[in-house]
Image: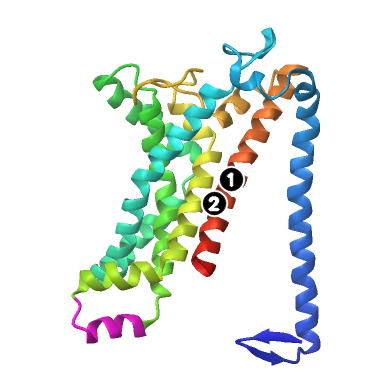
Amino acid sequence: MILFNNKILSPSQNDIVFLWILRLLALITGMIVILITSFLLLEALPLLQQVGWLRFVRDQAWHPVQGLYNLMPMLWGTLLVTLGSVLLATPLGIGSALFCQYYAPPFIGKGYRALIELLAGIPSVVYGFWGLVVLVPLIGKWQPPGTSLLAGIIILTLMILPTIALTAEASFAEVPTEYVQGAAALGLSHWATIRGVIIPAAQSGLVTGLILATGRAIGETMAVLMVCGNVVQTPKSLFDPVRTLTANIALEMAYALGNHRSALFVTGLLLMMLITLLIGIAEGMSWSKDYG
């Protein structure tokens, strides 16, 4: 029996087959996640058993060949470049969606939407190349060397902007017309309707877009590797070069051996923990909205 809109429906044979296909796909997806996590853990376990977790926080520097494994500068670089890009891209993306959906004439909105979709399809290496040859020299004229935390934030902002904008626009399009008509009947202005009715009604979709964009920002490798400078240090200003966790893996995995290689898998585990934390926050927000 299937419960749909509080009504019990008798499933047909096709429904049952489709249900089992969905269950199988869900099982395969879960197994893939478990296998990836298990592989990372098995590769990192020898070093974790040897030195423990605290060495990755307390060591003086990151020199794994010399037995120094401090990941904190790269963790801070990852968090700061992600936070900066999300803070910039969120209002820009939501504003773009509002413009396309409620303010722009149809032909302008359609063209603007196509431009956003084009941004979503550009490979990350192209963003990184543009940042390296255009953005970095511009920042370098202002504050050398140019490869910096600021360059990474700007590049990631451009990369995650389409995710937020397109998700937000889809969420706004799903808001029931009855809500808008009811607001108009109450005499609310256009902006008051958007602020007080449409945005709250689309909140779930907006949060989903924000989570997706944050996940992409955390996992981005090539673009930040090209523009951030790749210096292992905790940045003290926006103009300091930084290295992210993903860039660290990409730079060193090709020649890493022994404990050095295991340390890079610990870096991968740390990234998995960040993504898991992000998903947990999203689930917590959803739970509090549904049951709070």
Residue 102 placement: quadrant: bottom left
Looking at the rendered structure, the secondary structure element under dot 2 is helix
Residue 65 lies, in percent from the top left, at 69, 10
What residue is pinned by disc 1? 277
Residue 198 lies, in percent from the top left, at 34, 71
Q: Residue furthest top?
A: 66
Tell me the residue at 81%/87% (across/down).
13
Residue 210 lies, in percent from the top left, at 45, 53
The reply to whether discs 2 and 1 touch (Cβ–Cβ < 8 Å) is yes
- Give the label on residue 281, or none: 2
Q: Visible in this render: residue 268?
A: yes
Q: Visible in this render: residue 70?
A: no
Residue 153 placement: quadrant: top left
Residue 3 in magenta stretch: no
Compared to residue 116, the image places residue 198 above or below, namely below
Position of the N terminus, as image quadrant, is: bottom right
The mark tally for this picture is 2
**Amino acid type indicated by mark 1:** Leu
In the picture, measured across the screen, residue 194 lies left or right of residue 243, that is left
Magenta stretch: give its range: 178-188
Looking at the rendered structure, the secondary structure element under dot 1 is helix
Compared to residue 260, the image places residue 111 above or below, namely below
Tell me the residue at 50%/52% (across/down).
211
In the picture, measured across the screen, residue 141 lies left or right of residue 287, that is left
**Amino acid type indicated by mark 2:** Ile
Tell me the residue at 34%/44% (across/down).
88
